[in-house]
Image (spheres, coloured by chain):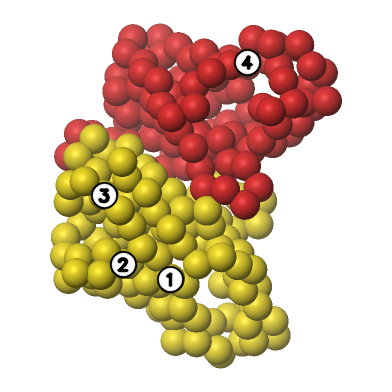
């Protein structure tokens, strides 16, 4: 049981490049979340999903896209990378509608130059 | 909207010292309150939580009590160890289970 896994751990992009951050969980959780963590700030919610095929915007969705074709995977897509997207990205999952604890992956540190 | 304000850091302590990190919140409903911990190079882990007023969450020697009258959830530990060096985040979850986080407090414990 690996929990929530994220790849890659680190990445450097040039302005305008695209990439996909991968997130997978093996706990059969319906709910999944993407957050970004900027220095000295709390985590901000980018997108979330309540189940396969269902996604919705969080607090800071601009510049990102998501998809949820399976219960296990929730990739985050950056189409045109900008320096403002330099951050640490965390994926999290939650089991059911009646539980409030989220489980986090180890994070992806992204730098856009 | 919901928001969480926590004590700014960084905080540097000696081993066996008493640790308090203040956290206050604003919420429209009746939120659940959490403390998450992030050890160096790792993701966030749930440290403790409380789901209603006057509940006390506890884990690994840490405690926090849900105080509705003061809208607070302060984290305390009586005797810290070097292994407690981490970033601590206070968070709340309202009826929609989305988490709102404080800015985090970096704690460094020296031997």
Cβ atoms under marks 1 and 3 closer than 8 Å: no
| Residue marked by disc 4 | A78
Of labels 2 and 4, the one closer to you? 2
Pointer 1 chain = B
* Residue B5 versus residue A95 in the image, above or below: below
* Residue A18 versus residue B45 in the image, above or below: above
Of labels 4 and 1, the one closer to you? 1
Residue placed most toward the observer, A45 or A3: A45
Q: Dot 3 lies on which element? A: loop
User: Is B7 displayed left or right of B98 in the figure?
Assistant: right
Cα separation between marks 4 and 1: 36 Å
Cα separation between marks 3 and 2: 11 Å
Pointer 4 chain = A
Q: Dot 4 lies on which element? A: strand
Cα separation between marks 4 and 3: 32 Å
Q: Is residue A22 visible?
A: yes
Residue B27: numbered disc: 3
Cα separation between marks 1 and 2: 8 Å
Q: Dot 1 lies on which element? A: loop
- Which chain is the one coloured yellow? B
Query: Which comes sooner in the sequence, label 1 or label 3?
Result: 1
Q: Judge the density around disc 1: few (<14), some (14-19), many (≥20) Cα neighbours within 10 Å.
A: some
Q: Residue at x 46, y 62 (%)?
A: B6
Cβ atoms under marks 4 and 3 closer than 8 Å: no
| Residue marked by disc 1 | B22
| Residue marked by disc 2 | B72
């Amino acid at each position: 049981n690996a929990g929530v896994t994220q790849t890659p751990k680190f990445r450097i992009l040039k302005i305008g490049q695209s990439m996909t951050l991968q997130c997978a969980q093996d706990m059969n959780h319906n709910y999944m979340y993407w957050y970004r963590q900027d220095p000295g700030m709390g985590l901000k919610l980018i997108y979330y999903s309540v189940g396969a095929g269902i996604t919705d915007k969080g607090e800071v969705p601009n510049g990102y896209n998501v998809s949820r074709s399976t219960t296990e995977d929730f990739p985050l897509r950056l189409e045109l990378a900008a320096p403002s997207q330099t951050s640490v990205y965390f994926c999290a999952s939650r089991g059911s509608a009646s539980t409030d604890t989220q489980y986090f992956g180890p994070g992806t540190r992204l730098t856009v130059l | 909207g919901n928001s969480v304000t926590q004590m700014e850091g960084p905080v540097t302590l000696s081993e066996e010292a008493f640790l308090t990190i203040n956290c206050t919140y604003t919420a429209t409903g009746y939120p659940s309150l959490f403390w998450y911990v992030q050890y160096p190079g790792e993701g966030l882990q749930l440290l403790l939580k409380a789901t209603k007023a006057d509940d006390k969450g506890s884990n690994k020697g840490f405690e926090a009590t849900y105080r509705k009258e003061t809208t607070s959830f302060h984290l305390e530990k009586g005797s810290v160890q070097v292994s407690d060096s981490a970033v601590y985040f206070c968070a709340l979850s309202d009826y929609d289970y989305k988490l709102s986080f404080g800015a985090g407090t970096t704690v460094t414990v020296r031997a």
